[in-house]
Image: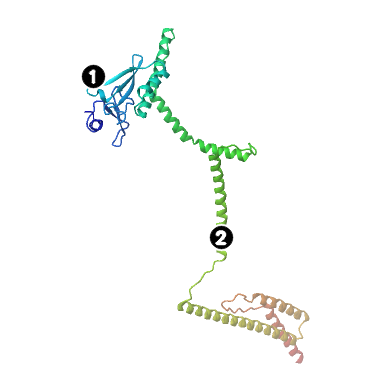
Amino acid sequence: MQHDEMIWQVINHQFCSYKSTLTKSKGPNRDKHQFCKHPYSTTGLCNRSSCPLANSKYATVREEGGRIHLYIKTVERAHSPKNLWEKIYLSRNYSKALEQLDEHLAYFPKAQIHRNKQRLTKIHQYLLRMRKLKLREINGRKANLVRVHRKVDQREERREKKALVAAKIENNIEKELMERLARGTYGDIYNFPEVPYQKALEAAEEAESDEEEELETEDEESDSEEMNVEYVEDLDEEDEDDLEQDMEDMEMNAWDDSGDDESEDDVSDNDEEEEEESEESGSESGSGDEDDTESEEESTKKKKPSDKKQTPKKRGVRVEIEYEDENDGLIEEEGLNTSAAGAGTAW
């Protein structure tokens, strides 16, 4: 008895002489495609709906010797394999052939009717091309058959795709559009593609927003630097002791400096007293010449600024310097001579 499901289980899972498996790629994850080599298969694929052995009600279209035939299989003839397939000639006219298919396949599944009509259309087209080529040969115009280089075409397609990716045409188009907008070549009318135009606008807005954010961050940093307040820890006991010692040392240095100033004032006062005494002695010895007195006054005047200039201004080690002048010696000798003359006159 005909049992379609059982036949399909055997064909699918065990063995079928018409089944052929082809792999698309190598490796463990390769894609496997199963095809059917049965002459009455409508699609050439190995599946449940298009298998001519596992379907008791089946129909297909075939071409034999330039003529199209319709083959129909029914359950009533399953007991005699010799008469299993019914063969029906179809008209050369395409429209009439379609009407015959609708008439004979009225009670078949719609999917199967559609597949048979597609098969009829394909066969009818290549039969027309065959007749045209034959007529050209008869008329002496043999057709030039051009070979189709499938591998070369595929290689060229791959190279074109890679070239497009490497060229980055979309980015170049966006740049060109932005340059034209900046130059104002199109005026006020713009009819650009929306996607690259929107992308360009978004890029410009992002650049402006980044600049604003940078300015805001700089302002915030400047404000924070102005308003910074630092808190410092209290001094330790050792640091306080060091500060007290430094203050004491400063006071002692100040007292020493004031003492040095007083000593310098004393030195200047002593020098002035000595000069006054020498002047008085010169006046007492009034018997001397007036020229000598004038010279003494000039010498004393010269001494004063020299003494003032030679006073040490820098605060440091105290140094005492004694000065001797030749004029003092001359004055003493003249005084002795005058006293001797007075004594002579007395005698």
Q: Quick one: SS at disc 2?
A: helix
128 lies above or below 27: above
* Residue 169 as seen in the image, left or right of residue 87: right
Q: How many marks?
A: 2
Residue extending furthest toward the right: 290
Residue position for label 2: 220
- The amino acid marked with disc number 2 is Glu
- Which mark lies nearer to you, 1 or 2? 1
Q: Label 1 crowding class (10 Å Cα cut-off): few <14, some 14-19, many 20+?
A: few
Q: Quadrant of residue 298?
A: bottom right
For the C terminus, give its image quadrant. bottom right
Q: Residue 164 location, x and y as percent?
A: 47, 33
Can residue 328 be seen from the camera position used here?
yes
Q: Nearer the viewer, residue 226 or 3?
A: 3
* Residue 279 as seen in the image, left or right of residue 121: right
Q: Quick one: SS at disc 1?
A: helix
Q: Quadrant of residue 213?
A: bottom right
Residue position for label 1: 82
- Residue at 57% over, 61% down: 222
Q: Nearer the viewer, residue 296 or 18?
A: 18
Q: Residue 308 location, x and y as percent?
A: 67, 77
Q: Residue 277 location, x and y as percent?
A: 70, 86
- Residue at 30% over, 25% down: 58
| Cα separation between marks 1 and 2 | 98 Å
- Residue at 26% over, 21% down: 84
For the N terminus, give its image quadrant. top left
Dot 1 or dot 2: first in sequence order is: 1
Q: Nearer the viewer, residue 57 or 248?
A: 57
